[in-house]
Image: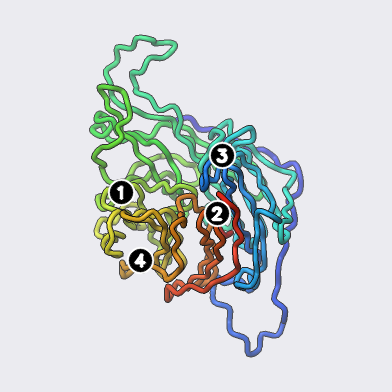
Amino acid sequence: MKKQFLNFLALGALMSAVTLTGCSDDNEGNPVTPPGEQEDRWITVAGALMGTTAGDGNGGTMVYSVSKAEAQNPDVQINVYEGGFGVKSNRTARLQSSEDGNTLFNIAYTGDNGGEFSRYSVNGGGSFTQSDVSANISQYAGTSPRWLKLFDGDKTGVALDVANIRANNAPTENDPNPTTPFEYYRGTATILALDLQESLIRNYVQYQIPLTEEEEAAGHTIFRLDGSVLNAAGNKLIIGTWMRKYNVAAGVVEAEYERLGTKSVVVDYPSFANPTVINSSVGHGDNSGYRSHFSYLGDDNNIYQATERDPNGSHILRINQNNEYDNSYVFSLNDALNLTGVTIEAWKYVQGGKAFALVSHSGEDRGYVAWLDLNARTASIVDLPYEADLVFNQYQGFLADGTNLYIAVTPVGKNGNIYILDSNTGVAMKGATLVNRTGNHYIGIF
């Protein structure tokens, strides 16, 4: 194992945050604010610009912030593409926000500044102030790193990468004609911790993560890592995987193959030492997510994890407090929704075992919003306008505020709305209008 620790000193002071307060100091007769609900805060909307094809999101990312009252008002119009701020990124930015909504965190994706971490103070409207302190992780995790903010009070971001996947007996410069028998395909995994407050790299590790001898002999390997989450004890990090299989005889990737369950990598935290692979026999898809969290710590201290590219449709899996899959917990979205080919594009745990998922399914090209009860293992489609060009495959950001969830719902190139979803009832309330532009779509609320 190669392990290196970096301790880069921050070069300047952090930008001060804007805090919004209520209009009255007298709370007599007013309802008590539910736990976790903020009386007021900035709510930032993100939109993805078209690159060469409508909906590809490859032209960059714009952001615009409004008050909570504005976000809830359907008479308010938000046009992120006219008055918004362009965050650094050659393609779609990978955004995260602070818990109070006063700070945006971003790692630029691809291009000359790919891998550059930035902090922005949220000032309202299209005003965002970039901190004069930044860090670039491309030397360690590449220019297209996957990363997420841990739920640890805005302290830590974790970036992940898998590079240079090759067979153990592949020719090298030093050994162009190896005679070693084939044993495995493996890449070098990087797990990197970012200090979000000091804008520095706290530590990183690099190593290969083996599967079982039988799995590796058949050509199975970890292709990508993403979707990390801390366990309840705070001493283990659970990381999602995207699996790949090679045809060992031909040395090429197999497009179709029999999957061997859903796998996660468990490492010690904060050292990232002792990687082990755990396997679910319930799910058979990947669980790395695409641009958002795919695993959440529930109120019951178990971790709930979604699958994608699952031949039996997406599942919600459960990892117990021993950091093992609970294979007695079976929650199939195909069964719960009475559909086939259900795919969870993105999802968010809200509270009390209630969650919402952005899904697609066989037979239709549009996306839907599903209300999930993880305890009852039931799901239903939320009553919303579902147009043909509504897709969620690039969706990134949700805002959970008490029992409510804020999401952006816009078909590609068409106006839509912010919706506020009640996690206890599954009922949606229409919020501000999101003004769109041809080829563009809104990808998150932060």
Residue 374 badge: 4
For the residue labelled by badge 4, is the local secondary structure a helix, a strand or a loop? loop
Of labels 3 and 1, the one closer to you: 1
Near mark 1 (Cα within 10 A), the count class, few <14, some 14-19 or many ≥20, is: many
Residue 69 quadrant: bottom right
Name which residue type carries label 2.
Gly
Q: Classify the position of the N terminus by image quarter.
A: top left
Residue 113 badge: none
Looking at the picture, tell me which residue is in the foreground, 220 or 312.
312
Please report whichever mark, 3 or 2, sits nearer to the chain's N-terminal start. Answer: 3
Reading the image, the residue beneath label 3 is 203
Near mark 4 (Cα within 10 A), the count class, few <14, some 14-19 or many ≥20, is: many
Name which residue type carries label 4.
Leu
Residue 278 image position (x, y, % from top left): 32, 46
Of labels 1 and 2, the one closer to you: 2
Q: Classify the position of the C terminus by image quarter.
A: bottom right
Of labels 3 and 2, the one closer to you: 2
Of labels 4 and 1, the one closer to you: 1
Reading the image, the residue beneath label 1 is 310
